[in-house]
Amino acid sequence: MPDFSQLTERQREIYDFIQEKIDSRGYGPTVREIGLAFDIKSPNGVMCHLKALEKKGLIKREGFSARAIQLVDHRPGSAGMPMLGVVAAGSPVLAPATEERFEFSEVFGGPNRFVLKVRGQSMIENHIDDGDFVIIRKQETASNGERVVAMVDNEVTLKKFYKEKDHIRLEPANGRMSPIIVDATKNIRILGVLVGVMRKC
């Protein structure tokens, strides 16, 4: 176990910041990111803290990039991405959360991501079929043409997003299905944007 007893309060804060970055995205912060996070104006000031952590045996550095900062005796946790239920590729459906987690991080890793299981075939022309899993990045805005998970009247659906003059159009990728048209003033909320698809087995 790392010995934190010899660290100053600032050194411990920087160590924790490095650990959080490694755990959340797979590699450490840059010197610039550390400086911005702790309001350290000079890169040399950051380097002094890093050298102290290195001297005390808590980190090791192999070069100057963010990936060069590594923690000694620490393996990033791998909790996987949460499975938040089912998303309709058809008419909107309820999507209750589950306790399952999926380990797609090596392919689609990143913060604020979750998994939904697809129900329906409205996105089949985008090669998203019934039973596939979609990886979604949480965000509340989208650009026209992006594939989004949207909540319409408290139910969720996976569609292409288009913001038009006085309405939102949620467009299926299936020529046999009609788009969902929602008045821009109605209750519609973007939950996230599609970043990956894992085929059903």
Image (cartoon, rainbow, N blue to C red):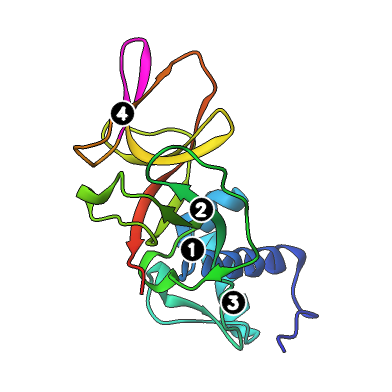
Q: Residue at x 57, y 43 (%)?
A: 94
Amino acid type, mark 4? Pro
Callout 1 environment at 10 Å: few (<14), some (14 to 19), or many (20+)?
Answer: many
> Quick one: which residue is furthest to the right in this view?
5
Q: CA distance from mark 1 to mark 4?
A: 43 Å
Name the image quarter holding the N terminus.
bottom right
- Identify which residue, 165 or 4, lies in the foreground: 165
Q: CA distance from mark 2 to mark 3?
A: 26 Å
Q: CA distance from mark 2 to mark 1?
A: 35 Å
User: In the image, which is nearer the foreground, mark 1 or mark 3?
Assistant: 3
Amino acid type, mark 1? Pro
Callout 3 environment at 10 Å: few (<14), some (14 to 19), or many (20+)?
Answer: few
Q: Quadrant of residue 64?
A: bottom left
Specify whether residue 167 is painted magenta. Answer: yes
Q: N-terminal of the two: label 1 or label 3?
A: 1
User: In the image, which is nearer the foreground, mark 2 or mark 1?
Assistant: 2
Residue 167, compared with residue 93, is above or below; it is above
Residue 187, compared with residue 38, is above or below; it is above
Where is mark 3, residue-wise? 77
Residue 54, how many percent across, how many down?
57, 81
Where is mark 2, residue-wise? 86
Q: CA distance from mark 4 to mark 2?
A: 20 Å
Query: Which span of residues is magenta-colored?
Result: 162-171
Amino acid type, mark 3? Gly
Return the mark for residue 29.
Answer: 1
